[in-house]
Amino acid sequence: MATLTHKDYEKATYPVEGMTCASCASSIESMLRAREGVAEANVNFAGKSVQVTYEPTIVNPNQLRDTVKEIGFDILIETQTQEQLEEREAKAIRSLKLKTIVAGALALPVFILGMFFHDTFAWGNWAMLLLTAPILLWAGQRFFTGAWAQAKHGRANMDTLVALSTGIAFIFSVFNTVYPDFFLSRGLMPHVYFEAVAVIIAFILLGKYLEEGAKNRSSAAIKKLMGLQPKTVRILRDGTELEIKIEEVQVGDRVILLPGDRVPVDGEVAAGSTYLDESMLSGEPLPVQKQPGDKVFAGTINQKGSVQLIAEKTGGETMLAHIIRMVQEAQGSKAPVQKLVDKIAGVFVPVVLGIALLTLLSWIVFGGQAYLTEGFLSMISVLVIACPCALGLATPTAIMVGVGRGAENGILIKDAESLERAHEVNAVILDKTGTITLGKPTVTDVVWADDVQQPKQLEQYFYSMEAQSEHPIAQAVYSYYKEAGAQVQQPDYFSSLTGMGIEADFNGTRYYAGNYKLLQQHQVTIAEELAQQTIKLQEDAKTVIYFADANRALAIFAVSDPIKETAAQGIKAMQDAGIEVYMLTGDNKQTAAAVARQVGISNYKAELMPQDKADFVKQLQAEGKHVAMVGDGINDAQALATADISIAMGQGTDIAMDVAGITLMRSELTQVAAAIKLSRATVKTIRQNLFWAFFYNVICIPVAAGLLFPFTGFLLSPMIAGAAMAFSSVSVVANSLRLRTVKLK
């Protein structure tokens, strides 16, 4: 592999044409990786695409294409619209369908002649030759061109197996048809195998056709997402209503949305009121009311009312475009187990060629009177039945369906590794604020110390201090006083004290606002009546913050952050699945205990700093647990990065989607259990697929070689081998498609 010295890489994904098996994917990857300037290349066989990371100053897309063309494949480097890609795909499938029908129609009379009327007609062999030739040279041409392109570089793939088996059988049969006396003069029958050639190619083409249809269904989710984008947009410019193409809409345009329209851009409602169906983005079936000032996202459906939007993000910048990119990259990424499968597939074909040759030699050495015929048939059967298609499809089809199934339910999976690893999770850590609670705290109680008679000026100071902070609790206090019409007074000094609160100076006096730890550190006393009120409020699951001067606490403020309606249900679902659930919070112990009690969590830790949360993740990992951290992707970034699986909850913010391995578009803990259930179902499907793919080859290759013949007289027909090979690929894809029906709740 070439060594790169530059770090300015570009990453691009191109559609690939011409792949027929996992070995094809392996060949493309190895050729691209060997190209100078290419840092990484990953082929998604099921998705028919390749993702290349390359240094543009050393190699360009045209050179990448030339490299792939050398071994008989092609990549589409020109920008293609979805419609163009679908048309190319449809054209290829139509061509495959035509060849399958023609091959089947010609193979049927060849099969009947060969099996039932072989010795009846003198011209039978010639008729079979004429019928088989177009099957081999036209319908099956792709196998020979592909095999030749591979052979020029000393490589082999499925095309090699099919071309060798059918090509040898055809040439041998033609020779015996033209020169029957050659073997007759030596006491041997001049057998022909036209029926085997015709039926093998017809079956393999039929299998590929069925496989293509199944693979297209496995990528249905991404096509459904792409179909959410409308083609035209109605806008208001200079007071005139215009209908323009979606590509022409600009940020700041005023977009008109009528009932039934899909939202074309991300933006903000400027006028009117309506309900939007956001289920394709969030999985939430109930429509959401939208009023002026509310955010809307491309792809959602306007159900009632006409509204006008101000476009804020268009085209590739919208949330929908971001999601599509994420799903595409996740579907194209490789699960860790796939790397092992790729290595096996890479050496599989050469090993099979060796086994086929060994089979023929064994029959020649140990076979009976018909050693040449049986050895020949057994070698062909080994070559045909050992196609590694099922092996190559086992993992990527399951990943594609699993990622798509998640996207349809508001579960965005960043890569295949996250999807695979999530099934091992046996401990889930939940951040309290924004995860278990709504993350929208409001002030519920204000209690001043008895000797504070006129708190108005102090309220002004307190409000002005909290106005400087972006902490959710500070924002709750800020909103509380802002609604009352308070004015901000600039402090003489201000400082934020991480994990404890804030401090500020007004007119030469130092004030503090924060938690109990802050008061402890500065030796501030708390009057007995405030202490008792604090305990009472905390027992009601309310967070208490103190406002104090340098000597004593002046007041306490209780802030309530309501628990989400489905929090307890989601936690129970995880516990029922055998997962230990922990809650971590920077809040005080009493409030944490009250929240944990209400949602059914017995393991919790309070008064934690961000570093403490990350340390707790490490502690659980040291105990051998596979830990998932669930947070909002910003405050818990350190813990999220430390965990085995990071799950971001929220409304799909850019930050959360970039940080987390899994992003939940709907902020409900039931989605965490659903994501883990999806991972377990996907991994189970991958294991089933790999078992049957390996089992099929382990069992069928020895049988095809004639292992049972000495004991039972059974010898596998190459025609049956071709049908079995086709069936194995289709069965693996069909098994992956079952993931579309898995109930996630």
Image (spheres, helix red, strand yellow):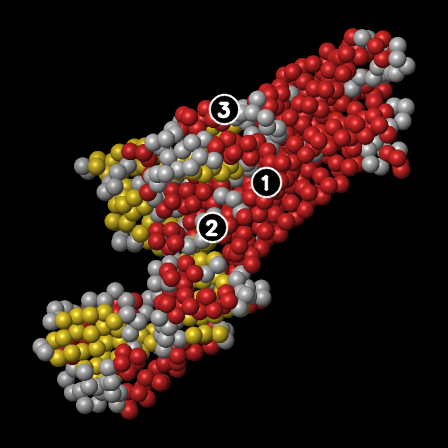
In the image, 525 versus 184, the foreground residue is 184
- Toward which corner of the image does residue 11 lie, by quadrant? top left
- From mark 1 to mark 3, how far is it between C-alphas? 22 Å
In the image, 384 versus 245, the foreground residue is 384
Q: Which residue is mark 3?
A: 69
- Asked whether the beta carbons under mark 2 and mark 1 sit within 8 Å of each other, the answer is no
The correct choice, above or below, for 641 with respect to 348 in the image is below
Mark in the foreground, 2 or 1: 1
Mark in the foreground, 3 or 2: 3
Q: Which residue is mark 1?
A: 343
Residue type of the residue flagged with mark 2: Ile
Mark 1 Cα-neighbour bin, 10 Å: few <14, some 14–19, many ≥20? few
- Residue at 68% across / 18% down in the picture? 135
Q: Position of residue 30 (x, y in %)?
A: 52, 34
- Residue at 42% across / 55% down in the picture? 660
Residue 275 visible in image: no
Mark before the other along the chain sequence, 2 or 1? 1
- From mark 2 to mark 1, how far is it between C-alphas? 25 Å
SS label for mark 3: helix
The correct choice, above or below, for 374 with respect to 519 in the image is above
Horizontal side of 527 relative to 129 (left or right) equals left
Q: Which residue is mark 2?
A: 413
Horizontal side of 563 relative to 576 (left or right) equals left
Residue 34 visible in image: yes
Q: Quadrant of the C terminus?
A: bottom right
Residue type of the residue flagged with mark 1: Lys
